Amino acid sequence: MVWTPEAQQDRVDVWEHIAADKPQAAARMDELFSDAVVELAGYPMLGRPRTLPEHPRTDPA
């Protein structure tokens, strides 16, 4: 699995947001992200396929 730079930054942003109040919870959330990546890498067809909507901030128009 390859993390895009945007996804990496999102992960950092989530960690920083949670860690501001609860560092242990931030560490646990980061662990959950890592666990999910390992599971998805091992089982890429896990879950149902879907199309992600574009977020207004990322729309190139």
Image (cartoon, helix red, strand yellow):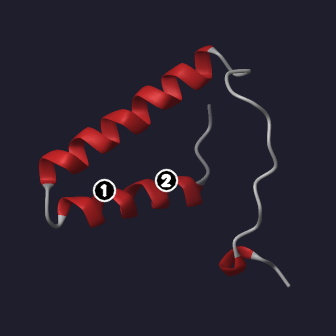
Q: Residue 31 occupies which quadrant of the picture?
A: top left
Residue 43 appears left or right of 26? right
Regarding mark 2 in the picture, which secondary structure is present there?
A: helix
Quick check: 23 above or below 46? below
The spot of residue 46 in percent (x, y) is: 67, 21
Q: How many residues crowd mark 2 within 10 Å: few (<14), some (14–19), many (20+)?
A: few
Task: Please give the residue where the numbered disc 2 appears in the rendered image.
Answer: 8
Q: Residue 54 occupies which quadrant of the picture?
A: bottom right
Residue lying furthest top: 42
Residue 12 appears left or right of 9? left
Q: Earlier in the sequence, mark 1 or mark 2?
A: 2
The spot of residue 9 in percent (x, y) is: 47, 60
Q: Are marks 1 and 2 in contact (CB under 8 Å)?
A: no
Residue 30 appears left or right of 9? left
Please tell me which residue is depicted at 42% across the width and 38% down the height of the picture: 33
Quadrant for the N terminus in the image: top right
Residue lying furthest bottom: 61
Quick check: 7 above or below 35? below
Q: Nearer the viewer, residue 21 or 60?
A: 21
